[in-house]
Image (cartoon, helix red, strand yellow):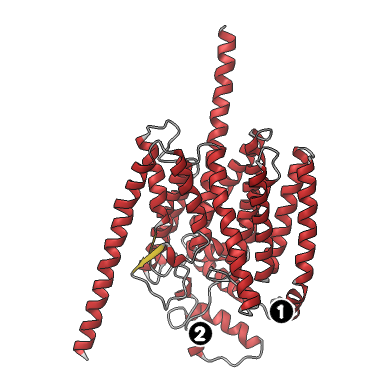
Amino acid sequence: MPLVNWAAQRMEIVKTLIKVIVIAFVYLGLGPALGVMMKGRDGLRRFLLGFLAFELVRPPSDFTLMLYSIETYRGHTKGFEFNFLEAIAMGFAVAAILEKRKDFRYLPPGLGAWLLWIGASLVSVVAALEPLYVFMPAFKYLKMAFIWVGVFAAVRDMKDVLALMRGFAVALIVQVIVCLWGRYVQGGFRVMGWFEHQNPMAMWSYMVAFPLLALAISKETKMKDVGLFFAAFGSAGLVVVLSVSRASLAAFGLGAALVMLGSFVHGFTVRRVSLGLAGAIGGLVVIGVAADTFMARMEGGDDSPENDLRYALNQQSAAMFHDHPMTGIGWNNFGLANSRPRGTKYSEVLENWERNRGRNIYPENFQKNPLTESLYWLMLAENGALGFGTFLLIVALTMGYGIRSTVAFWRTPAGLFLMGMTISLAVTYFHGQVERVLTQTKNLTTWVIFCAIVARGEWWRREAKKARKAARLTARAS
């Protein structure tokens, strides 16, 4: 036995060393090298923007590598995760630095609030059952700063926006093909494509779909892109239907309606009316085809508090927040604090709920209880008022950037796009009440990309304001 254990340990050491070498090569070698290659090459930068967006549809294992992973843990972060897409973002930043661009910022709008949130959430370590677990999400979210800085540096004008969104569009079309294969060839009921679960897949799809729809109905968009973007928008709708997620279907319909209504305020055009009608007809056809699936889902569910597990898990969260209102029970510690043996007090909340439903309670069945589905209840429980309050600051800032830049550029090609982006953020934030989807790598990375884009919109707004002020001063001086 000792020899077998030693051999297994040596193998683990070798695997870890290989991972460290790969990570070092990607972050310290490939990232900066891409920056050198992109210097002065707009075409390469735009190609990599599109690749960055497309790669997010692929399985997470394609672009992540985990050190010290605890696969048996039911937390939202299981180890120290390296996301190789961050290396591409590093390249964007390095290229901007080498080009000595005046619009490059190490701390773009909103990133300070992001870092403040991470710092406030780290305070939760004081009550954590496993302090090490707190540093896992902190590490993951802190590195998202590379994405924020890099995308902010790379998106310099609407040509860059189009390159990025073409990547997302192709990703959605590929995803619907994968989902159709899973549904009609493999016989799946609730397909999930290349995602970990159908709900994050559906939320990612509609999040990307709204700015694509806005670009498709913009009169400045070329017809070849109109076809691509509208096909991707339709693919997103079909993916949402195939996921059989009722909340996501409602969110998709609401967001699409808001984008269309906003475009009509912008002005009626043949393109907008025709694409609006085509979308409505296509939606009715798809829903009609999938009606039996949705009816089966509706008939099989009971969302009353007495039978909704989410209600019981939120009650656990409320109990944790009550006991630790300022700092929470520890970032990424919910899975420990709500389960036996270390979280017996909060596990009993779930056990009592089960008991009231007439179930027999066996303590050994409550050693790995699920996490609450609500992003906000999870954050209140784990991070307390400090972490939750600073997260709301991020929400307020990114929504404010989106709204202000949309208004500022309403009569320009960027106006409708920024409106679609803002609607995506708003619907996703609202949906967070029942889904913790922004903790998962693919959705998290996409969210940060969108935050960086509305930050760039805010930058454009500020620069335009400065230019107008300078022009007025010049006019007065003359």
Depicted 304 relative to depicted 391: above or below: below
Q: Is residue 344 left or right of residue 214?
A: left
Q: Which residue is depicted at the point 64% across and 56% down?
A: 232
User: Looking at numbered disc 1 in the image, what kind of residue is underneath it?
Assistant: Gly
Q: Label 2's element?
A: helix
Q: Nearer the viewer, residue 328 or 71?
A: 71
Q: Which residue is depicted at the point 65% across and 41% down?
A: 222
Residue 361's x, y, as percent?
Answer: 56, 91
Q: Earlier in the sequence, mark 1 or mark 2?
A: 1
Q: Nearer the viewer, residue 85 or 437?
A: 85
Total numbered labels: 2
Depicted 401 relative to depicted 175: above or below: above
Q: Which residue is depicted at the point 77% across and 50% down?
A: 276
Seen as rendered, the residue at the extreme left is 3
Q: Nearer the viewer, residue 166 or 22?
A: 166
Residue 412's x, y, as percent?
Answer: 65, 33
Q: Label 1's element?
A: loop
Q: Is residue 79 left or right of residue 373?
A: left
| Cα distance in 3D space between marks 1 and 2 | 23 Å
Depicted 314 relative to depicted 258: above or below: below
User: Looking at numbered disc 2 in the image, what kind of residue is underneath it?
Assistant: Phe
Residue 443's x, y, as percent?
Answer: 53, 60
Q: Which residue is depicted at the point 57% across and 49% down?
A: 165
Viewer can see residue 204: no
Report which residue position mark 1 lands on.
301
Foreground disc of the pair 1, 2? 1
Report which residue position mark 2 lands on.
366
